[in-house]
Image (spheres, coloured by chain):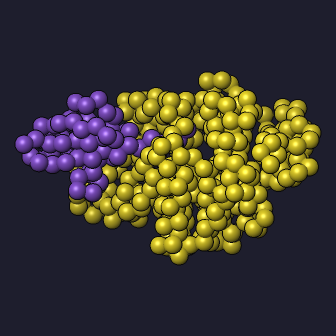
């Protein structure tokens, strides 16, 4: 297969775009696609201070790399969850993130959950009914809490996460299978800071296939953690991704079409506007100030209090 | 000597003269779920395998 731009040997074939590119042109093409997404959804501009949530994985490190190359002011936030799982998962992902930041001269904020809140995420989760068997739910709310807090405290105007198209399509499939109206209404490339204590969140990779992100990281020589989180084994989102990949293999472009059709349908009024059907007043947590669905302290503050 | 195909901690064999796509089909892996590399370079699925090649398949899916 040949590169469409130069006729040289292609390194990647993107069947959904009917496009083959060599390494040189692929490393130019992908950041251009990200820039187009940033502009299309009016995510942020050169005047913004962007905080990138980096996990040490291929998507977030590549996103940071791309934003830096596109000339944006983008600092990183790494949250050390204290997950070991027999593979030093957090220690290794932290090392790779710090190594990336140092090599590129970028500013990285590190929040160590155990140092800050007294216990690691698995230990915090073990104290709760929802996290006793698997800490994923508590991990998610801990990360959201810390990302909002740091963005707010440090004055960042926008928080960027490395969610790619496959992440978004898998979430969409899960929410559709359950007709989870509230979640479907809120799933979008940009989440406005429309609730107390929440940062404006953007997903600049939401139209980029996970496979394309992997290829980018490999071709760019970004060293990332290839081990899966030890708690991700058997996760439903991974099953959905595999299911969607089988569909994609038969019909290239299915994942992109699924996601973009959803965004278009939403834009055309398929769902009631946010807030119209919520019926759930939003309150500010008296301890951290972030949004919570019930009066009183938010779930994160209640969990964190138990460990102190 | 044939072709070695590595995926996570498993090793498979493929025939020289066939394509990466054929090797993936033989071991039951969807092209959508991996990136194939040879000597650290990303290669396409139509690439023909040669005697002694070591093909590392990098998993694409992550998350939880």
User: Can you give x and y, in whole percent of width and height, for residue A22 in the image?
Assistant: 30, 59
User: Can you give x and y, in whole percent of width and height, for residue A242 in the image?
Assistant: 45, 32
Image quarter hosting the C terminus of chain B = top right
Reply above or below: A26 against A49.
Answer: above
Q: In the rendered picture, chain B carries what hue?
A: purple
Reply above or below: A28 against A198.
Answer: below
A167 relative position to A22: left or right: right
Q: Residue at x 70, y 48 (%)?
A: A119
In the displayed orientation, state which residue is furthest to the bottom.
A105
Q: In the rendered picture, chain A carries what hue?
A: yellow
Q: Residue at x 71, y 31 (%)?
A: A130
B41 relative position to A292: left or right: left
A294 relative position to A188: left or right: right
Image quarter hosting the N terminus of chain B = top left
Q: Quadrant of residue A158?
A: bottom right
Q: Residue at x 53, y 46 (%)?
A: A84
The residue lying toward the viewer, choosing from A187 and A32, is A187
Reply above or below: A238 against A7.
Answer: above
User: Can you give x and y, in whole percent of width and height, for residue A78 in the image?
Assistant: 61, 59
Reply above or below: A175 against B63.
Answer: above
């Amino acid at each position: 297969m040949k590169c469409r731009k130069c006729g040289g040997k292609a390194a990647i074939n993107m069947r959904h775009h009917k496009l083959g590119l060599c390494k040189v042109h692929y490393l130019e093409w992908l950041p251009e696609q990200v820039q187009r997404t940033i502009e299309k959804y009016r995510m942020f501009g050169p005047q913004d201070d962007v905080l990138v949530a980096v996990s040490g994985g291929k998507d977030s490190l590549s996103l940071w790399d791309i934003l830096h190359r596109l000339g944006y002011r983008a600092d990183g936030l790494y949250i050390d969850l204290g997950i070991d799982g027999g593979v030093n998962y957090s220690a290794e992902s932290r090392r790779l993130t710090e190594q990336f930041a140092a090599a590129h001269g970028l500013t990285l904020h590190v929040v160590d959950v155990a140092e800050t809140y007294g216990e690691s995420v698995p230990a915090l989760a073990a104290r709760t009914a929802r996290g006793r068997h698997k800490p994923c739910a508590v991990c998610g709310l801990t990360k959201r809490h810390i990302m909002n807090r740091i963005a707010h405290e440090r004055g960042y105007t926008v928080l960027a996460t490395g969610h790619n198209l496959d992440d978004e399509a898998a979430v969409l499939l899960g929410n559709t299978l359950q007709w989870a109206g509230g979640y479907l209404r809120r799933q979008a490339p940009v989440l406005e800071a429309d609730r107390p204590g929440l940062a404006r969140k953007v997903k600049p990779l939401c139209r980029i296939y996970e496979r394309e992100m992997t290829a980018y990281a490999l071709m760019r020589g970004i060293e990332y953690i290839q081990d899966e989180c030890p708690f991700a084994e058997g996760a439903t989102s991974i099953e959905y991704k595999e299911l969607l990949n089988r569909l994609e293999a038969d019909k290239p472009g299915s994942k992109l079409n699924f996601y973009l059709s959803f965004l278009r349908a939403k834009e055309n009024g398929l769902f009631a506007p946010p807030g119209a059907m919520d019926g759930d007043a939003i309150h500010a947590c008296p301890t951290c100030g972030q949004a919570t669905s019930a009066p009183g302290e938010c779930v994160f503050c209640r969990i964190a209090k138990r460990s102190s | 000597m044939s072709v070695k195909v590595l995926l996570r901690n498993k090793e498979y064999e493929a025939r020289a003269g066939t394509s990466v796509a054929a090797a993936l089909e033989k071991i039951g892996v969807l092209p959508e779920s991996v990136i194939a590399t040879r000597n650290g370079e990303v290669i396409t699925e139509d690439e023909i395998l040669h005697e002694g090649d070591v093909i590392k398949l990098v998993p694409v899916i992550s998350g939880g």
